[in-house]
Every structure is written in structure tokens, then in C-alpha cells.
Amino acid sequence: MNFGTLIKAFDTVMALRDVAKRVKGNEGPLFDSGQTQAPGSALAGQIEARLTNVVVAALKEAFDRDHARMELERAQLEEQRRRAEEAMRQELRRQAADRELTRLRVLSATALVGWIASVSIFVARAASATLPAKLLMAGGWVLLLATLAVTFTAQGKVGDDIVKGGDVPAAARPGSLAVWLLIVGLALAATSLMF
């Protein structure tokens, strides 16, 4: 429904009513005290009342439609905001997982290099190594290999957490254990060189 056309029609009817009053010479009040109303003015009054009701109903409908549209837009904006927040949380989780994976890869590479270095040093000094040195070196190897096992397991767990949409801190605990295993394993391997 075009409101501009409705308003123009209402203005036209009002203008015709005013012209009809002037033509009749009846510019006074519509109701004389004690006299009955003329049939022409009663018809104009009915038309005016009907048009007023139509305009009021049209305006009410327009306001209701605008209110419904605004509620729909508000709901859409809220949904977009919720999606943006969820996307941000997913991105932060992904970045945290990437950092944790990088840290675990560095730990596993360090453990592997430490194990290879300790084996090569042991092979070079195998003939002159004492029993305590051999036991310390073997303990260091076990801990370095355990570090590799823990880091590989933790990497798999971080990958599963990414797929499931979980948080990374649950998988960071094995990474902390891997750090301690690496430190103790390297310390035992270095201590074995003193004997």
C-alpha cells in the first residue's frame, strides 16, 4: 500500500468537502442547535470518518511492519555477532593449538638430537666407560626416548582437540611432562660423561 497515494486521496476528499461547503454557502458548524444535519454534509462526514479510519489503520499497519522489520534486523545482527564471536574463539583455539604443536615438535626434535648425540658419544667412549657411566647413559636414553613418546602422543592429542573444537590446555599437560623428561634425560647423559 502506497501511503503517499493514500494521503493525496485523503487531501483530495477534504478539498472536495471544503469546496462543497463553500458552494452551498454553509461554512458554519455542521450541527445547528436543534436543526437536523443536511444530507450532503452527513455523507461527507461519513466519508471523512471512513478515510480517517483507513489512514489510521494504514499507519498502524506500517508501524507494525516497521517494528517487525526492526526486530528481524536486530535478530540478524545478534546472530551475526554471535557467529563472529564463535569464529574468533575458533581462531584463538587454532592459534593456541599451532603454538602448542610447534612447542611439542621442538621438544621432540631436541630429544631426538640429544639421544643421537648421546649414543654417538657413548659409542666413541664405550671402551673406557665405567658401569655407573653406562647406567647413567642408559637412563638418559630411556628418558629421551620417553620424551619422544610423550611429545608424539601429545601432538596427536592436540590434533584431536582441534578437530573436536576443544581447548588446547588439556593437551599441554603431556607437553609439560615432556619438558621435564627431556631435561632429566639430557642431565643424566651429560653426567655420564663425568665418570
Image: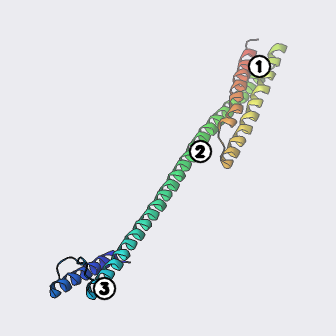
Q: Is residue 103 above or below residue 192?
A: below
Q: Earlier in the sequence, mark 1 or mark 3?
A: 3
Kind of element beneath mark 1: loop
Q: Secondary structure at mark 2?
A: helix
Q: Which mark is residue 147?
A: none
The reply to whether residue 112 is in sight is no
Q: Quadrant of residue 189?
A: top right
Residue 180 x/y as whole percent? 70, 24
Amino acid, disc 1: Arg
Location of mark 1 (residue): 125
Q: Which corner quadrant holds the N terminus?
A: bottom left
Q: Which residue is mark 3?
A: 43
Name the element at disc 3.
helix
Q: Nearest the camera: 115 or 163?
A: 163
Q: Position of residue 28 (x, y in %)?
A: 18, 77
Which badge, 2 or 1, is on the more N-terminal residue?
2
Decide if residue 176 is on the left or right side of residue 7. Answer: right
Let me know if residue 94 appears in the view: yes
For residue 158, above or below residue 10: above
What is the CA distance from the residue labelled 1 to the residue labelled 3? 122 Å
Nearest to the observer: residue 108 or residue 47: 47
Mark 1 or 3, which is nearer the eye? 3
Task: Give the farthest residue toward the right.
Answer: 131
Residue in the picture at 17% in, 87% down: 24
Which dot marks residue 94? Answer: 2
144, above or below 82, in the image = above
Q: Residue 52: give x, y in percent of width and height.
A: 33, 75
